[in-house]
Image (tube, coloured by chain):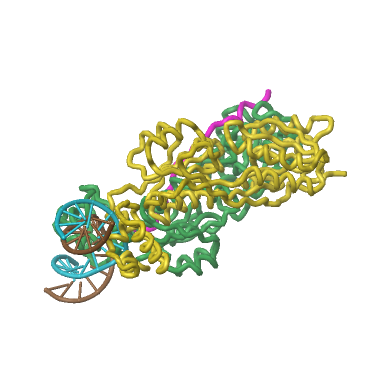
Chain colours: A yellow, B green, C cyan, D brown
DNA sequence: TTGAAAGCGGTACCAA
DNA sequence: TTGGTACCGCTTTCAA
């Protein structure tokens, strides 16, 4: 493992300068800085978190703003954050809202998750704090802060296309709660696919709020229509799992008589029978990317705001098939 | 924050001796060792993970043997482990079986979770490795290794008592998979409560394997009996959630016409409607305790095997109530 | 069985 | 804008 001394030798500067570069101090000439970065890259240097933590008075605490009611989403996010931070030697602090954020002293950076990631008050507070922060799965509603997410709209479009390709011509969509941007984006993606079919496919929309209970209501509503859909696309897995229960109640076999698909690839999508076809958004990767960005910002990366779009993936499992003829 | 130097001064030895004590080297006289431990306790000393990590060549890697098919259990365990390790400066390595365990070099210790925690091959390998290890939620089937868990039997008894106290006189139980010790223990606890009622309460048992699909089958079986139970106790939350679906299908309102309770307090128990009354086993605390024990073993604790029983708790939510008259 | 000196890989503080 | 020195808290190596 190379150290700053090796980098210094390689770059022809003192090790102190190397230290400065990796701490984002602005008292290094751009030329020198680039020379050092280049040398570090060449010999594969990365800072030793233990050494830094030992000497540095600076905080290594990263706050995770998270109050999502979906426990499985929250747990996945937390694992991703913890995993990403452990290798970098950061310490995770859970923050469930504005009060917790204000009460926490000595934060080095923040990762904000929906719905907090779009909360204007949170955004204001974050801006005023001058702390580096990353918003996960959020809308680019503000010019401050970096953003990491997937293209929900494209993903929803793909999932709908998949259903259409299976032969469905009457598809129901259960929306998510309005306070989440993703609800709107997923609905937009669904509509994109429907519109592209130029009338060949009919759509029916029911409202939900991402909860199981709301999914149950919406599914009953959709399935009790005279001309009920042969497939239902729920904006998240919990509502999709509620669709399964509704289908079960009505003696509709899934996927033979009704197809059901979800979104998120949450644990529940696999816990249920049949396992739900869904969209994976790689929450862990998202969090890992967030921590990377934060880490860069904390060591002086002053480039314009990042807006990173990660890949998504349609996970085909057992809950969707061709429509009954 | 006191350092080893402070402890050394307090104990009247050199700081090197303090270091030795906290690293479990056996070249320290018991008297001296105790003197040091006492002094450290007095001034509230604890080792600085960063400093240790920096200097030490010794591994800080702890393996987590985990292949539980329940994703929510696995995620909870992982969070608990990550949380406990981050503060101590350990690094987590996921191990999904014997092969992974053998392939991983330089492990400092291992935490094993069910069902691997009871696998004879794993136990053999662990014993041969001479690594400190803790088994979570396992049976004391072997004399090696420490163990951390809850009293599943007592917890199941309490939950059954709760149902009896609500007035139920005909209670169904859905068993877990036979390869897990906990299945047997939870069933035993259920039977304890039934037997104590001296005939006042009837029980019906159906077999399951912890999966949603098996819960669906078992619930249908139980509910289609002539004299069906007024309450069902499923050995885990996923099967309890399947009971909800079965009840929904048969138009049995929960909890008015049928009570359903689960075990584990997993995310699904809250994701579903109505939220499931369940038993919380505090997986995070269990993992935190495991890491503590491991940490002690790695720094020379040679006391006899621990066998720590944590508290459990019946979480009353909305899925159970008095039976219909 | 115990202790002294050296140093792990960085950062803080001050000087140039 | 850059460099030098001290030193963080602990473990390692070697000597007593």
On screen, residue B23 versus residue A97, left or right, reads left
Q: Is residue B38 visible?
A: no
On screen, residue A179 versus residue B310, left or right, reads right
User: In which quarter of the view is residue A133 placed?
Assistant: top left
Residue pictured at 49% horizontal, 52% vertical: A288
Residue pictured at 55% horizontal, 39% vertical: A139
Q: Which residues are magenta?
A: B303-325
In the rendering, at what x and y percent does residue B313 appear?
49, 37
Q: Is residue A310 visible?
A: yes
Q: Is residue B323 magenta?
A: yes
In the displayed structure, B135 sits above or below A2; it is: above
Q: Which is nearer the eye, A321 or B132? A: A321
On screen, residue A200 versus residue B203, left or right, reads right
Q: Which is nearer the eye, B87 or A280? A: A280
Q: Which is nearer the eye, B159 or B83? A: B83
> Which residue is at the far top?
B325
In the rendering, at what x and y percent does residue A197 appear?
79, 42
In the displayed structure, B204 sits above or below A275; it is: above
The C terminus of chain B lies in quadrant:
top right
User: In which quarter of the view is residue B162 placed?
Assistant: top right
In the displayed structure, A166 sits above or below A243; it is: below
């Amino acid at each position: 493992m190379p150290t700053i001394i090796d980098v210094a030798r390689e770059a022809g500067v003192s090790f102190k300068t190397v230290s400065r570069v990796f701490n984002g101090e602005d008292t290094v000439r751009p030329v020198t800085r680039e020379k050092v970065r280049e040398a570090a890259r060449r010999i594969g240097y990365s800072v030793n978190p233990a050494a830094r933590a030992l000497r540095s008075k600076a905080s290594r605490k990263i706050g995770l703003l998270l109050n999502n009611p979906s426990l499985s989403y929250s747990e996945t996010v937390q694992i991703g954050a913890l995993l990403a931070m452990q290798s970098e030697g950061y310490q995770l602090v859970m923050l469930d809202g504005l009060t917790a954020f204000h009460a926490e002293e000595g934060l080095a950076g923040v990762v904000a998750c929906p719905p907090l990631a779009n909360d204007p008050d949170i955004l204001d507070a974050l801006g005023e704090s001058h702390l580096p922060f990353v918003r996960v799965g959020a809308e680019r509603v503000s010019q401050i802060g970096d953003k990491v997410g997937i293209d929900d709209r494209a993903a929803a479009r793909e999932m709908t296309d998949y259903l259409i390709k299976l032969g469905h011509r009457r598809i129901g969509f259960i929306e998510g709660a309005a306070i989440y941007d993703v609800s709107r984006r997923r609905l937009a993606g669904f509509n994109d696919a429907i519109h592209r079919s130029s009338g060949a496919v009919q759509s029916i929309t029911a409202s939900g709020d991402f909860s199981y209970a709301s999914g149950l209501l919406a599914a009953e509503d959709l399935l009790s229509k005279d001309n009920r859909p042969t497939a239902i696309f729920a904006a998240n897995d919990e509502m999709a799992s509620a669709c399964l229960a509704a289908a079960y109640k009505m003696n509709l076999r899934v996927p033979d008589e009704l197809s059901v698909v979800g979104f998120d690839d949450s644990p529940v999508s696999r816990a249920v029978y049949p396992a739900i076809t869904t969209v994976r958004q790689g929450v862990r990767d998202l969090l890992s990317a967030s921590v990377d960005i934060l880490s860069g910002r904390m060591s002086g990366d002053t480039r314009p705001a990042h807006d990173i779009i990660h890949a998504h993936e349609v996970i085909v499992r057992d809950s969707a098939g061709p429509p009954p003829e």
